[in-house]
Amino acid sequence: MASSSSYNSPCAACKFLRRKCMSGCIFAPYFPPEEPQKFANVHKIFGASNVTKLLNELLPHQREDAVNSLAYEAEARVRDPVYGCVGAISFLQRQVQRLQKELDAANADLIRYACNEIPNAGVSHVVQPSPGARPRALDQFHTSSSTGYYNQHLPAFPMAYPLPWNENSPGNDINEGGGDGNI
């Protein structure tokens, strides 16, 4: 970054501190005059003297990262005087945990969906009921939008045997247990 003294405009630090910005000003490359609030926050939290000492102790190629870190921490502390950047980090960690839970739920849904779409591969001894013997109540597993237990927990395999209820029996709602009680 070029020194702001070459533009005859003092850097944000020198302007804030009301001093002349010299050609070797340690603040000039990192606090341009267009960003006065950046230095104001850093000065308010860390103090100009401490920042000067810190920058003088660092190698020139490390200074920009240090100033960016100081500016981030100072802005976070100004916004949240109690927690500062720790509050922002905690918020982001909670957000990551929430998104991880959503991702895990979506992956579980995908696995359930994939298991429901897999045909009976490798199963050769499944006894199939006669045509028309399969109760239509099972169609609710795939077409109903109700929110009962059976509709939320779909079987991972197709049923190869008839269930004890059918749509003509009393209590044909599979969410109620249905049928005449004989299992």
Image (tube, grey):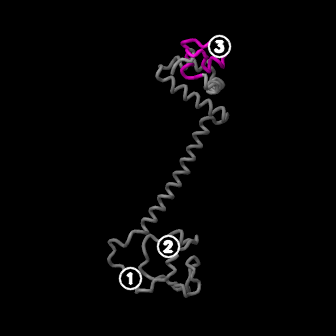
What residue does disc 1 label?
128
Per the rendered image, the range of residues in magenta is 6-32
Q: Residue at x 38, y 82 (%)?
A: 128
Q: Residue furthest front?
A: 7
> In the rendered image of this protein, does residue 110 appear above or below residue 27?
below
Numbered circle sitting on residue 176 = none
Using the image as rendered, state which of residue 29 and residue 112 is in the foreground: 29
- Looking at marks 2 and 3 on the same chain, the residue that comes earlier in the sequence is marked by 3
Q: Position of residue 82 (x, y in %)?
A: 67, 35
Q: Nearer the viewer, mark 2 or mark 1?
A: 2
Disc 2 from disc 3: Cα separation: 76 Å
> Does the magenta run of residues contain 20?
yes
Residue at the spot of label 3: 19
Q: Position of residue 97 (x, y in %)?
A: 54, 49
Question: Label 2 is placed on what type of residue?
Answer: His
Among the two numbered marks 3 and 1 on one chain, the one whose residue lies closer to the N terminus: 3
Give neighbour class at mark 2: few <14, some 14-19, many 20+ (Cα, 10 Å). few
Eyeballing the image, is 45 above or below 21? below
Label 2 to label 1: alpha-carbon separation: 19 Å
Q: Main secondary structure of the magenta part?
A: loop
Q: Nearer the viewer, residue 52 or 29?
A: 29
Residue that carries the numbered disc 2 in the rendered image: 142
Instruction: Please name the residue shown 49% across and 56% down the image.
Output: 104
The residue at 58%/12% (across/down) is: 22
The residue type indicated by label 3 comes to Arg
The relative height of residue 66 versus residue 80 in the rendered view (above or below) is above
Check disc 1 and give the amino acid type. Answer: Gln
Q: Look at the numbered disc 3 and give the secondary structure of its residue.
A: loop
**Residue visible at 45% across and 86% down in the picture:** 133
Residue 82's place in the image compared with 33, above or below, is below
Label 2 vs 1, first from the N-terminus? 1
